[in-house]
Image (cartoon, rainbow, N blue to C red):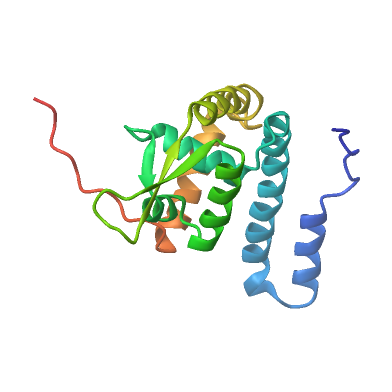
Amino acid sequence: MARPRPLPIDPLAEAKRQWLAHGWTDAADGMTAVISVMRAQQLLLARVDAALKPFRLSFARYEVLRLLAFSRAGRLPLSSVVARLQVHATTVTSTAERLVRDELVVREPHPHDGRAAMLALTEAGRDLVERATAALNSQVFANPGLSDEDTADLTAIVARLRRNAGDFTDPRPQPDPL
């Protein structure tokens, strides 16, 4: 992928300058933060997409495969996949249908709920997700483009934003190991 030349100015700094010039001072910092995170997401997603392209996987398909591979038996109820990925059920259903079509996942009946379905990873799916994970680790995750300290700080800041938005609650303290 060809890398575009850097712009001579930071467009977000210019946007903030315009916000301030128009008298929107109470919103300028928030606008800059929101748009900065959105632009960072675009940059990181482009890197993730490039790493997954040789495997013919979208990030959504990768996430479902990785989640199944993390489970003890390589299978989960569809409802658990929806909850853990925090996306709409129709999104997971359509993603799962493509994975089934590509023989990376199979649908199975739920052992205790006749109305529910299980998704189970096939050997081809397990092999693919392991190779894709190795590529993501080496091409993106091992060097996200920030120092280790900045990476930790950014993760903590975004976690606070997510928690404050109701994305999760902090876990209860665990007892010290014996």
Q: Position of residue 6 (x, y in %)?
A: 87, 40
> How many marks do you count on the picture?
0
Residue shown at the point (82%, 59%) measured from the top left = 14
Q: Position of residue 161 (x, y in %)?
A: 47, 57
Q: Position of residue 162 (x, y in %)?
A: 46, 56
Residue shown at the point (67%, 33%) measured from the top left = 52
Quarter holding the C terminus is top left
Answer above or below: position of 150 versus 60. Answer: above
Residue shown at the point (88%, 33%) measured from the top left = 2
81 or 169, which is in the foreground?
Answer: 81
Q: For residue 137, what is the image quadrant?
A: top right
Answer above or below: position of 43 versus 128. Answer: below
173 or 134, which is in the foreground?
Answer: 134
Q: For residue 30, what is the image quadrant?
A: bottom right
16 or 162, which is in the foreground?
Answer: 162
173 horizontally vs 129: left or right: left
142 or 59, which is in the foreground?
Answer: 59
Quarter holding the N terminus is top right
Q: Residue furthest bottom?
A: 23
Residue shown at the point (52%, 56%) measured from the top left = 93
Q: Position of residue 177 (x, y in %)?
A: 13, 27
72 horizontally vs 97: left or right: left
